[in-house]
Every structure is written in structure tokens, then in C-alpha cells.
Amino acid sequence: MQAKKGKVSVMMGNVVAANVARLCRPEVVACYPITPQSEVAETISGFVADGSLDAEIVEVEGENSAMNVVLAASAAGARTFTATSSYGLVYMYDAILQASGFRVPVVMVNVNRETPGIHSVSSGQQDMISTRDAGWVQIIVENNQEIADQLIMCYKLAEDFDIQLPVMMNYDGYYLSYLNEEVEIPEQSDVDAFLAPLKNQPQRPRIIPGASTGCGTHGMEMGYVEARYKHWTAMDRAKQKVDDIDKEFGEYFGRSYGGQIEEYRMKDADIAILASGSAAGTAKTVVDTKREEGIKVGLVKLRLFRPFPEERLIKALKGKKAVGVIDRSICFGWKYGPMCMELKAIAPAIGSMPILSYIDGLANLDITVPHIGRVVDEVSAAAKGKAYQAVTWIPME
Amino acid sequence: MVIKYKNQFKTEAPWSDANQKMLALDTGSWRTERPVLDKSLCNYCGLCAIYCPPQCMKDMGDHYEANLAFCKGCGICAHECPKKAYTMKPEGDFTDAG
Amino acid sequence: MVEATKKRNRVFDYFCETDQFSGGVAWCAGCPLELIARTVPKVLGKNMVFVGTPSCSAPVLHGQNIGAWHKISYLACVMTGVASSATGLSRYFQRTKQDATVVAFTGDGCATDIGFQTLSGAAERNERFIYLAYDNEGYMNTGNQRSSATQKGAATTTTPVGKIGKGKPTASKNMTMIMLMHKPRYMATANPAYMEDFAKKLQKAKEAAKEGFVYLHVFSPCPVGWRIDSNLVIDVCRTATRTNWFPLWEAENGKPRFTVEVASPKPITDFTKLMRKFSHLKEDGLAELQKQVDERYSLLKLLVDNIK
Amino acid sequence: MAAKMLASALLVEGKHVASFPMYGFERRGAPVVAFTRFDDKPIREKTQIYNPDCIIVIDPGLLTLPTLFTGLKEDSIFILNTAKKEYKQPDKALKTCGLVNATGIAVQEVGRDIPNTCLLGAFAATTGWLSLDSVLKSLPEYLSGDILQRNLKSAERGYKEVEVIKW
């Protein structure tokens, strides 16, 4: 099949998200503006204003309302869209839990930014990390093209009858939200065709006036357990589904991203770097350079954070000699970064190897080429049996 | 892994469905007193039925009668009746008291 | 027994639907909230959709597992988000042309406190649904704690009366005035003692909600929290209006008018003596309450007389 | 905005491009730093630029920033919005300089002090990395009507009037 082509132009990450959201034809949209997400809210409001998107747009008075609007509309059967960041994400926390408990296929863009406590209008994944146990699917993307493509895939995943889960797509504030990059935006008809099979599925339950059904019933004892169990198994199913949809997308549009994780030069690698988001792009350039220097290093880009891609990671990392994990957030209560902690949980299955934790890129401090280069060097040394530091806060060195 | 559980919900999400299962509490057992009507005083004005919180007054054509399966015995009917046709009598006086 | 007097009460004419609730549901004996909840679908019809929150109504509005306590479709949402959830539903029903009356059914704690922002937001956006706040002047579901609808001097579990404590130290939010200032398409106060008035207002609300935001503030004294004998609850409701504690009025597009005129209002002691939540109040405390009732009534009267 | 327009113009040239600004609070008139990369290969690096090949200073008031020229590559290019016709080499790594009175041209052509398009023209002329044609072709993506015409003129004048100095 000939891959479907779109129009290439230079577009800001936030504008990409809004444009592609439009292509997915959401019926109810509610966004509350927050830096660095505002252009998503502005652009999509503009689409409704100029008639290029036929959607109910609710100019809510806060993020909590944004999430409540979309979850309720979704419970009534609507396709919905919302976007937020940081303070906004935590302000909608009760509704976020509600959405996943209701199993409504809400799709939300979260533009990663540091969270409250220390005021910081800057990039960081702390917001996403603070909602990791909310029962949402969490996906992290690397660049503007991936924002475009993954957003379409998010709808396909969320609304899949076997999944029925809310999906949060994360991308780095500033680094991607304001990044102007060339992006191929697919044609409306192609997106329609790609998402069309969703309509042929059995209908998920929805609130219908007069139908005597209710969403949000009390889960009493085994009812609660059953609902949680179903949610838990759906999360597990979502992993394979992410891979399947990515493959399908690749066949259709000619671009794919590896599904749950992207393995970059991992096949013959001795050591690996685990990174996510925009930093994974920088890491790829470092891997290339270090390969030229003779270090057999590969990169695992974590795309799916919730559910955690346990099986894929084991497959990718088993037999490697050491791995370095770069976290753009902190795990309070553990000394390692959050993603490093998650990796450590599957450490027995990937084999005993040094796992080095790095904290970097907080508060718009770049995860630079030299930083990652240093990580590669240290991991490489650790693989050869050299003593290493378990956790390194790179900016503090 | 196979976990056997009773599949209560036919849906992925926990939804209730009144068509499948309507719940009812035995609120009749909450009662300590029951309304007893003196039919000769009743003018069928309907105020007892209008104000009855559980709406358990049955329209008998010329008077109302509390459905004792659900009547909680609050006594509003007796208090609101303009003709004072209801008397609240202790449940212990009745042989059908559970 | 005279045949001629055996006429049906007019209230019944407002009911287009039978009781949609199960016979036995978990509301306290004598609770007017049960009466309010059962009345709403009777007037609005089966196509209404309840949006409920954690509250006294939650154990009944929301089902248990697959089981339900009523036949109305509903969404059970978080307390912060009742108005915004109702927005989401109402927008989608409008868009898909489904005939529905969305009713956010919640207490004063949600309306005046934790859900106030979303209520105000929905009113400002003129969302098309009915927001019904049943006012029991506190958090009754959780055991009688104060809310911002609790009146000054009232004894609650978080404003207890003790050596130093004199009950709630500040006056309640004048919620109906706040909502009037939002100029909703329709708003009204209602009181289950005045059932025909209530039913009429529900009917108006249903029509008005097709065009814009509707706010209903319904008096719902809590027999347990206010310490009222169960059989006196309707009496308390009636007295609340007769003393101007809870005047009955409505406003279309921000123009208020009384629906029940009280020619010579009774002193509020007639009201307070029916319950024990004010029983610790001395003359000065009661006088202060009377003053507040008079002030609020005259403000309302001023608006009724002057907004044409 | 200028950085984004530049990216669009480079896209017309068939390059891969990426540009982004770095700021905290957006305030009109407040200084802002923006970075643009272009390459024949896809650009994967998502960081600020520490070793630029070219630096454009739109507001000469910022020339006093002590770190302005830190990390410059050898033989790099400097483009300055100034009415001056000569300029003393501010850093020895800078070998080429383009001086253009972008503000003056913008005020004349666009009618407001928005020198962006003029600077793009000057950039094309000074660096030779892209043609004036690509700059002009990219502008309709951002502007239309009378404003577009004025800006096309402004860009063209920037291209023609820039004073290129070799240090």
C-alpha cells in the first residue's frame, strides 16, 4: 500500500496538537489555558470560531471543569479532547481519577512542565509522574511529527472496544510546545479512514436520556474489585495494542515509532541509555557520535510509561552489560529517578547489570549533548566493572 | 493468570442498569410507629400523599393508605392532615410487626 | 364525609410521570430531600438525566454495582465538578439532538462551597441545564458540619457550642442573591411545603433550560442535623417561608418576583423553636438572626420592586 | 516569530528545520532568545544552541549582554539590526558581519517597528544559506494582503541593503 501523504509545513508543537486534534473530529472540547499549553487551547478555539471544526467548545473556568466536561460528554458517547499542563493537571486530579474509573476514552494532551511547590514555568516531567497511578495510559513523544501521529493513534487506542481507557499524550513544554519544526499533517480523509473502524465496534455504554442506566455507580465489595480488575487487565492489554496500532499506522501513513518503546541501535549494543521525550532525540545524536568512537551503545526511548512496557523492555535490555536511565523528574521517597525505579522493578528479568540513575533537565535546564555523552561514558565504564555512582544529579555536579 | 470472578457488570466500566436490577430497602422495618387512618375523617384532600417523603401513599379512590412495606413512620402524614384523620400508633400494638 | 370535597389536589396535575424511585431508599425518615428528589422526575419526565455528587442524595441517586434505586439515567461525578459534568452532558445532548433535561442535583455544600466555582462558571456561560441545590444549611451527609450556607449561630459539629464556641460565627452566603447577579435564564427558590409552587417552578425550569441556565434553590431542612422531630419537617418548611427565613420567589432573566407573598411575616422565633440547632441562642443571638432575615428580605424586596 | 519564519524559508530550500524560543513569562518588549537549526538530515537534537554558526541581534540594546558571544564557532556570522554602516568586531570568532537598518526599513515599509522580515532578507544575503526567493515564498504562510506586500518589500530591501563586512 502506498503510504498516505500529507502537507508539510513548519509548525509549532502546540499548533500541531490542535491541528491534529481537529483532524480527529472531537465533538466536545474543553481546554483551560496554561503556559506552555495555551496555543493548543487558542488554536482549537480558533478552529471552532472559523468554522473549520464542528465541535462544542466549552470555555471552562478551570482545568477541573475541563476534565469534568470531557469525561461527562464522553460518558454520553462523545469523542472529546482536552489539553493541559502542570498545575492544571493536578487541579483536575479528582476528575482524572473519575475519568479512568469510568473508563471513558478521553484523549488529553499534557504539555510537560514542572509542578507546584517550587514555582517554575519550565519544562520537566514531574506533572506526568504525579499522575502515573491514575489509571490512564500515558504516552511520551519526542518531536512534533510524533505529536501529530501519536495523537491520532491515541484516539484509536482510547476508543478501542477492548481498551476503553483515557489516554494522556505527553510532550515536553518549551522544547516541543514552542518548537517550530517541519511536520507532515495528514489529510482529513486519511485520518477519517484510519479512525473509521472504531465506528464498527460494539457500542460502549453511554448515558442515554430515558434509558435508566447510570455511570458512576458505587462499586460495592466484589463490584469494586471486579471494576478494578477489569481496568487492570485493560491496562495490560493496552501494551500490545499500542504496538499493533503503531504498526498499522506505519503501514497506512509510512511513519511508525516502535510502539511501546523505540529501540535505536540496540541490536548489537553492549550498553543502553533509557530516555524519553525530546531528550531521546538528543540522545540519538549522542549514540551516533559514541558509536563512531567505538562504544557500542544503543538507546531505548520509553514511549509508553503507563502501562509500563515490561515485556518489551526485558526483550530489549536482556543481556546488555549496563544501562543508564535519564529522568526529567524526581521520585520523592526513592533515591533513583522515577523511570529508573520502574526499570529496577524488572531488573531480575533483564539480568544483573549496573543500572545508573541520572536526574537532568529539570526547570528548562537542557539535557545537553555533553551531559548524555557523559552518561554514556559512565555507563560504559560501569559495564567494564568500574565503580559507579548510583544516582547522579547532573546539574548539581 | 486466570482469576475467576462473578461478572456483575456486563460492561467494561461499572455502570448500573435499572432495567436489569432495581434495588429496594426494607424501609418498612425502620418504623416504630405507623399511621392509622380514620376513614370517616378523611376528605381525600391528598396532602398526606403530596407530603409523604417516600411517596408511599396508595390512592384508594376515596382515601389514601400508607404502603407499610416502605413507610418509614415519619409521621408527616399525621401532622399535615388538616382533618387529623391519621393517628400514629406504636408498631408493638400490631401483630404483623416484624 | 361529603362527596363534593373529594377533589384531587391540583398538585397532581403537574405530574407527567409516576414515581421513578424504588419504594425503599436510604434517606432518613421524614427527610424532605426524599420528597424533593421523587418530585423532580415526576414533573420533568423520564428524559431527565441526574448529575449527582457525593452528598445525602448519593446513596440513592447512584446505584450499587449493577443495581439502581431509580429509573433515571445518571452520571455520578466528583463534588467539584457537578456543574461542569452537567455542561458536558448537556452540550453533547444538544449537539446530538437528544431530548434531555440535565439536572445537576446537589446540596448546599457543593453549590456554595466546593462546587461554587464550576456553578458560577456554568451560569456565566449560560449552559442549558438545571442546577438544583437542596439547601440543608450544612454538610449533613457527613454528619452535620458547617457549610457556607450555615446560618450564623447554628450549632454544627464543626462549629459546636461550648465554653467559648457560640455556634457558627459568621452569617451564611446569600446564595440566591449571588445567583441572581449571574442573571440566569431562570431561577427560583422552592420549598416542599409549597408543592404546587415547586412543581410550577420545575415546569418553568424545564422550558427555560432549553434556552439557558437555570438555578433552583430548594429548602430542605435536615431532621437529624437540625434536630427536628420527623413529623414536623414540612411544618418547618412552611414556617421558614412564613417567617421570611426562606422567601419564595423566582426570576426570569434576572427580574425577581415573589411567588408566595407573606402578608404579615411571623417572628423567626416561630421557626427556630421548631428545632434544636438554635436552642442555645439567647435573645441577642435570635435578634441578630431576625435582623439578618429582615435585611435580606428588604434587599430582595427592593430588587423585586425596582428591577422591571 | 522571526525564527519560525526563517525555519519556513529554510523548509522551502528543502532543508530539515527546527527552531524554538526559550522564555519564562511572555511579555511584550521583554528580551527573548530563539534558536534555529537546519540540516540536510532530520534534526533530532532538542536543546538550546550552545555553539551557533550565526547570531542575529534584533535589539542592539542587548549587545551588552556578557554571554552574548559565548560558544561561537570559528568563522561565525553576526547580523545586527543597526543604522550604523560600520561596526567594530565584537568577538574574534566572528568573521562575517551583516549590518542592516531593519528597524528603519520596517518603519518605512511595514509602517511599524517589526524588523523580522527585513532581517530575514539580510540573513539570506549575509549567510548565503538560502535564497531571497525562499524567504519571499515562505511569507504568505504567515501574512496576507497589504501587510504581506509590505513585508515582501521589507525583506527584499533587507536583502539588498544589508552591508556585508568581512573581518
Image (cartoon, rainbow, N blue to C red):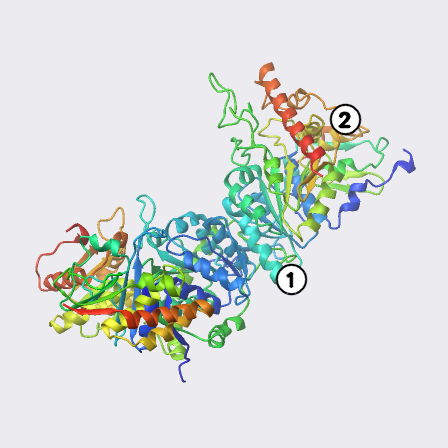
Q: Residue furthest bottom?
A: A1
Which residue is the site of mark 1? C97
Could you tell me which secondary element the residue under label 2 belongs to?
loop
**Residue B55 drawn at (x, y percent):** 71, 41
Quadrant where the image shows the C terminus of chain D: bottom left
Residue C21 relative to residue A46: left or right? right
In this rendering, the answer to whether A26 lies above or below C137 is below
Residue C92 or C36: which is nearer the viewer? C92
In this rendering, the answer to whether A338 lies above or below B80 is below
Q: Say few, some or many: other residues with alpha carbon within 10 Å of mark 1 (under 14 / 14 to 19 / 20 or more).
A: few
In this rendering, the answer to whether C197 lies above or below A179 is above
Residue D75 or A262: which is nearer the viewer? D75
Regarding residue B74, the answer to whether it shows in the image is: no
Q: CA distance from mark 2 to mark 1?
A: 46 Å
Which residue is the site of mark 2? C263
Residue C273 relative to residue A14: left or right? right
**Residue A171 drawn at (x, y percent):** 34, 61
* Labels 2 and 1 in the same subunit: yes
Amino acid type of the residue that numbered disc 1 sits on in the rendered structure: Lys
Residue A340 or D6: which is nearer the viewer? D6
Amino acid type of the residue that numbered disc 2 sits on in the rendered structure: Ala
Q: Residue at x 15, y 62 (%)?
A: D89
Q: Residue at x 60, y 14 (%)?
A: C283
Closer to the chain start, of discs 2 and 1, is 1
Chain under numbered label 1: C
**Residue C113 drawn at (x, y percent):** 52, 38
In this rendering, the answer to whether A125 lies above or below D147 is above
Residue A320 or C258: which is nearer the viewer? C258
Chain under numbered label 2: C
Quadrant where the image shows the N terminus of chain D: bottom left
Regarding residue C274, the answer to whether it shows in the image is: yes
